[in-house]
Every structure is written in C-alpha cells, then in structure tokens.
Amino acid sequence: MRLLTIILILIHSNLLSQICVTDEYNKPFIDSNPKKYRLVEENLQNYHKSKTNSEIVIPIVFHIVWINRIQNLHDSVIYQQVEILNEIFNTQNTDTVNLTDTLKNWVGNFNIRFEMAYRDPNGLPTTGITRKKTINPHFSYWNDPVKKPHYGVAPWPTDKYLNIWVCDLNDDLMGYAQFPGGPDETDGVVIDWQSVGNQIYPWIPLKYYEWSRGKVLAHEIGHWLNLFHPWGNTYSGCGEDHIPETHLQKNPIYPERNCPDTLFSECQDSGRLFIKHYMDYAGSSCMVCFTKNQVLRGLASLHTYRSELINNYIPQIAISGFENTKIYPTFVEDKIYFEFPEYEDKIEILFFNLQGQLLKKSTVENKWFHLIYPYELVPGFYLINIYHNNIKVFSQKILKNP
Ligand SMILES: [Zn+2]
C-alpha cells in the first residue's frame, strides 16, 4: 500500500512539478513536524485579522547563482522584477481590468513594499544582489544545493532579509518556496532565472511565455507567506487552502483554459471558482490579483512567523549630526553643492536611480564643502545617499533637469 501511495505521489507530482514544487519541497518538513505545522495553522486561524494594514517593508536580497553568462542576470532585470512585485503587492497592476465587477470586490492589497537590501549582514553598503559562478549546471529542489555554499550561496540572516535564489532549475521547474515554520537556514524562495523580470527570451519553451511578466515570483512569495495552491497542499486535489472565496478546487487551471469566470467546483462544494489570482497556474494574463482572504492569511503569517523581519527593518534615515547635511539645488542644472557637518574622516556620496541602481560614487575626506558635476546622469529623479563608516547617514532626492 505504501509503495502504491509513493508511486501515485510520484505520478501526480510529476504532472504538477513542471511549474512549482513548493508542495513537494515542504512535504518532508511538514511530515516530520506535524504538531508544529498544525500549530502554525491554528495560530493563523486564531490571528486577529482586523489588525491595521499599514505599509510593511521587506528587505530582499537576490543571490544569482549562474554557470552560463546569460544566467548572470543584469541588475536592471532584478530591479524590473522588484518593480513588478511592488505593483502586485500594492494592487498597482493595471491588468485587474480582466476581472469582473464582482471579482474586483474581492481583490486584496498586501501593502508590502519590497526594498533591495542596502546593507549586507556586516553592515556594509550593498546593491542587494550577490553573484556566484557555480559548477553545477542544474539545480534540484531536493536537498537545496543552491542554498549551500558548495554549489550555491548560504542565506543572509532570514530574520532580516527575504532571500531569493536565482538559478537554473532542473526539468524546467519555475520555482519553490518554504512555508513558515521551516528551518531558518533554508528560508526563502528559489526561482528559475528565465522567470525573473519581464524578459521574453526567444529560445525558451512556450510555458515561460505563459507564466512570464514577473508573476512566478509573486506566486512563490505567496507560498512563503503561507498561501497554498487553491487545490490545497495535497496530491489528490480538493484540499483546503483556507481561502473561502476560491472554493475547493480539484485541479490546477492551466493557461489553455483561458481562466473562465464560470467554472464551478468539482469537490464537495458547488461554489464558483475564483481563478484569476496568483496562486493558481492559470498563466500570467490570468494571474492578476491576490484575493482579500489570501491577503489576510499572508499578513497573519508574516506577523506571526516572520515578525522579526518587520521589526528588524531599519529605514534608511539620517543618524548622528548628519541631519544638517545640505544638498542643493533640488532641481539640478550642471552642479550639485554639498555641505557637511564637522567630521574628521571620509564619507561617501552614492547616486542611485529610483530603481535602486548605483550610478555614481564619490569619496570626500576632511571637507565640509563639496561640489559635483553630474554630467553623466541623464535627466530624471535620483536619490543621493551619504555614507559615514559604511552607515547611511543622509538621503535626499534630486531632479536632474534636461
Ligand atoms: Zn506554487
């Protein structure tokens, strides 16, 4: 009987595993800690869900583990992905027009902002992206080699950062995530490099077109926030995802179904299925929202199991005497003036675009006044950050005029 069960699991997981292996990945943890996961679920059900939904900032770090140079994604692809995530987790995406008026009432807003880590675990300035050339051509979810130093990269402290590993996953897998309650040393999300950002690569299999536009990572972060697939984290379907409005669902809905609005549950539940959310497999043109109860469940899991991540966040604000720093003018023509408080060692001036990309760096030593000609910056908004002893002490936005 046990053998038959294993065979059935393998057959079924093989069908589903081509997209997301989160259920397979978490199964050993859940099976070996049933009490713990029951408690995780009970705590979520009892969580007082009326808590105010103020903005939450989650620092993220991307570990790019590559073997072919093309997999070593450019910073701009990562920034584009983060921009997409921030649209999705703040309901600023415009494709919700695909929803009927009734479904629009069920859209939830996480009000989460993902911010590229600006300081690494040693307190040093960072772009929030690490890169490692590996000797492993493809990565499996089994044993998590991408999260270990030999082939991959160990996570940054998971109570301070959401770790996202980007690599070439086996068998055209797109990603997997760890549910709350798993080991700290593996917490985070793994995503195939071809699913990151809004790139369409001409050589990739058709399925990557169907699940493109940066939405695979939204799906995986949904899992990281303890959202299940709408068929539940079971192999037989009709499992509980604890989201009333999605109703019990037997199977994934794939892109070829074109996410119909009138599909009804085939389980012991005659409700109409809510397909157009990020946690099904309906394809990027159908995956347009998180539902209200998905948001409540995700926020409950964040506040209950990953509260350190919220509490440890240090905003990039001025500290010490540097609040008196002056940077002017705000509308820059050809030069920018800097006035610093008294100090005796060196400080660094870093220019970022609004996507967080470092564009210009300048070091100043024992001067209270400094002048920069930002010729190389194209017109637009920029963020100037001042660092002292590797700690950001002042920040100001400027507009470079045409
Ligand atoms: Zn999934």
Image: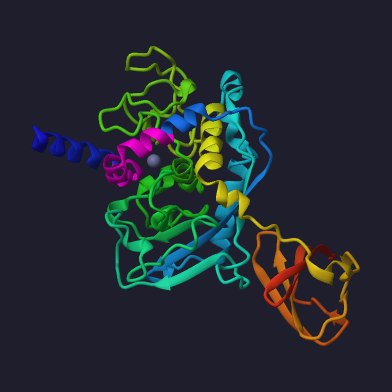
Residue visible at 79% across and 76% down?
A: 374
Q: Nearer the viewer, residue 87 or 298?
A: 298
- Residue 134 position in % (x across, y down): 35, 72
In terms of image quadrants, where is residue 327?
bottom right
Q: Is residue 39 left or right of residue 85?
A: left
Q: How is the image coloured?
A: rainbow
- Residue 219's x, y, as percent? 46, 42
Query: In the rendered view, does 327 fall on the left or right side of 348?
Result: right
> Would residue 379 be seen by someone viewing this image from the given angle?
no
Vertical side of 116 occupied by 270: above or below: above
Residue in view at x 54 percent, y 57 percent: 161
**Prevailing secondary structure class for the magenta stretch in the rendered image:** helix
* Front residue of this view, candidates 100 and 146: 146
Verify whether residue 24 appears in magenta.
yes
Locate residue 181, reporting x and y percent: 41, 44
Range drawn in magenta:
17-40
Question: Horizontal placement of 289 versus 259: left or right?
Answer: right
Whether residue 64 is in magenta: the answer is no
From the viewer's perspective, is residue 371 above or below residue 379?
below
Q: Position of residue 231 (x, y in %)?
A: 35, 28
- Ligand 1: which quarter? top left
Up the image or down, 147 lies above or below 188; here it is below
Q: Is residue 271 visible?
A: yes
Q: Nearer the viewer, residue 32 or 65?
A: 32
Residue drawn 42% across the image and 36% down it: 40
